[in-house]
Structure formats: C-alpha cells, structure tokens
Amino acid sequence: MPKTSQAAGLHRASLEKLHDLDAALELMYYGWRGMTLLADEYLAKQGLSRPHHRILYVVARRPDIAIGTLIEILGISKQALNRPLNLLLERKLLTSKRSPEQHRSKQLRLTQAGQRIEQRASDHERKVLREAFDRVGTPGAAAWMAVMETIADNN
C-alpha cells in the first residue's frame, strides 16, 4: 500500500464550506492529489517531481519542441522552466539541439530513459482516470470532460 501523509487522509467534508462552490473546489484539489499520488511517488523515487513530469509529458507529445513553445504551453516563465529543464538535460532524459531554421532556438526531445519515465508516471495517472471513468460510466466521464474542457478553455 502506498505511503501517504496524514494530511492526505483528511476528508474534504472536514473543511468548513465558506461558499457554495467550495465542495467543487475541494473535489478539484483532492481529485488532483488522488490522481497524481502514485505518479508523484514514482517520480520522487527517480529524483524528480511534478514540474519534471509536466515537461516530459509535453515534450513526449511534441518532439523537437522549441523551448519558447514549451514555455507557452506550460504557461510558466523562462526562470521557472530553467531549473527542472536543466536537471532533465543533466540526467539525459532530454536532448537539446539547435533548430536548423533558427540557430538561436533550441529543440527538445525525450531520450529513451525520458520516454520510459514519462510513460510510467503518466500510466499511473491514466489508471486512476480509467478506474474513475469505469465507475461513473460514459455519461459521467463525458460530463467530467465537458466541465474540464470549459475550465481549460478559460486559459
């Protein structure tokens, strides 16, 4: 059984509701933590964390992505990207090469080791989603997707 913190065991009902949407907010927070718990434990064993996984996730789906494009997709600053990106490059989970079209731009690609780590971490999250979708059925999964798509489109 995975090791969890005492705080992870707190039930959302133990928090006072200050607004009618607090229950939905808490479900987002607790749901996210529940979905990423095993992935984060796996990443920690690899000496990595959530920001590293986010980078690996995007680069896996956009090989040869420019660093500027990665920054835009992640919605973070160049400074925020610097430390986790450098670690991934040092650990040879990513490669960086100059763009043939724009010499000032660097392109990122996963190595085999990076692919393996990204896939295993994402597999933990996909498993949680699959189990939840199976429990709520197609209408519940479609409703969740619609809500999350609407929220994501606010970006």
Image: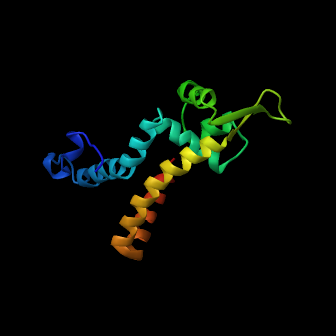
The answer, for residue 10, to whether it is visible in the render is yes
Left or right position of 22 against 70: left
Foreground of the two, 152 or 69: 69
- Marker count (numbered): 0
Indicate the position of residue 30 as horizontal and vertical percent values: 29, 49
Residue at position x 43%, y 37% from top?
A: 45
Indicate the position of residue 134 as horizontal and vertical percent values: 38, 71
Residue at position x 54%, y 24% from top?
A: 83
Foreground of the two, 1 or 146: 1
User: Hey, which residue is sitting farthest bottom in the picture?
Assistant: 138
Q: Is 73 located above or below residue 27 in the figure?
A: above
Indicate the position of residue 60 as horizontal and vertical percent values: 63, 48
Residue at position x 58%, y 47% from top?
A: 116
Indicate the position of residue 77 as horizontal and vertical percent values: 56, 29
Q: Quadrant of residue 76?
A: top right
Q: Is 86 located above or below residue 152 in the figure?
A: above
- How has the structure been colored for display? rainbow
The answer, for residue 154, to whether it is visible in the render is no
Q: Quadrant of residue 128?
A: bottom left
Q: Is 51 located above or below residue 147 in the figure?
A: above
